Amino acid sequence: MSSVELEPGVDVRHAGQRFHTDIPWLDSRHSFSFGRHYAPDNTHFGLLLVSNDDVVKAGAGFDTHPHRDMEIVTWVLEGSLVHQDSTGHNGVIHPGLAQRMSAGSGILHSERNDSWRLTEEAEHGEDVHFVQMWVPPDTERITPGYEQLDIGDQLDTGELTLVASGMPRHGQDQAISIRQEHAALWAARLPAGRSVQLPTSPLAHVFLARGSAELEGADVLDTGDAARVTGSEGQRLTAGTDGAEVLIWEMHAAIAA
């Protein structure tokens, strides 16, 4: 990781520019190179390595697989996601419940949508829609860990809400913790016309999970769009007529080239 000195600017990446994985049980949009999708000029932004916008069909999901040395934050937009891992943690993640898994020295986990309901005609299930984000830890080979926290009440205020942080100035009692002292994740559910300010930081990644919003000094962002902001100075983000749900990474370092 390295310190950041960049000229102020905004690079808008529209939803349709993302890589796309489309298989029978998964519809996934990748903001950065992921899996078989690779572009050498789009491997990460700042400390953010992965930002996947996933829709998983009922009864399906990611079977048990390994991770190492990664802080993984999952944010559910609709439906529910069942998590199980090799350290004995398990839980059901739903909208408003922040979740972090520290892969550390090595962990196995699975994530599945087990939503099913039986009617007289057939079995039906609801899709689960979530965003999963990865940042590298500031310390390698830590003991794997898991944390979740319901922040739905804070989100209902329409204010920018701290979701996850490893930054010492944020303390440890208002969000889930990540082992990355140079990064924090914020979220907001904005009613129409409501504004929030971006955190002041060398790097900020703004993702419109749904709805639309106007970012000061840039284009209107629609669902699935992202803005890669350098030299963030508290620009205002204002929700459109249908409101917006936004995820913002505040970053004070970058992955070394």
Image (cartoon, rainbow, N blue to C red):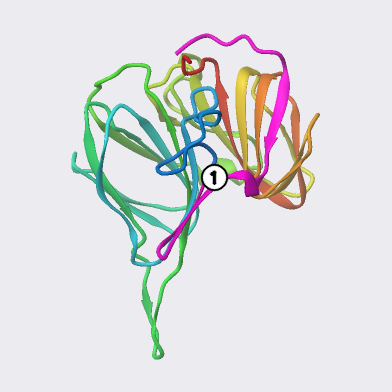
Q: Which residue is drawn at 39% across and 35% down?
A: 72
Q: Is residue 180 left or right of residue 140?
A: right
Instruction: Identify which amino acid the numbered label 1 is placed on.
Output: Asp
Percent coordinates x, y for residue 225 in the rendering = 66, 43
Q: Which residue is drawn at 57% across and 24% down?
A: 250
Percent coordinates x, y for residue 131 in the rendering = 49, 46
Query: Label 1, on which residue?
Result: 153
From which residue to which does the magenta span run? 1-29
Q: Is residue 94 left or right of residue 15?
A: left
Q: In this view, does 104 lie to the left or right of 240?
A: left
Above or below residue 219? Residue 28 is below
Of 225 and 177, the residue lying toward us: 225
Above or below residue 88? Residue 166 is above
Of 238 and 57, the residue lying toward us: 57
Above or below residue 96? Residue 129 is below
Percent coordinates x, y for residue 59 in the rendering = 34, 66
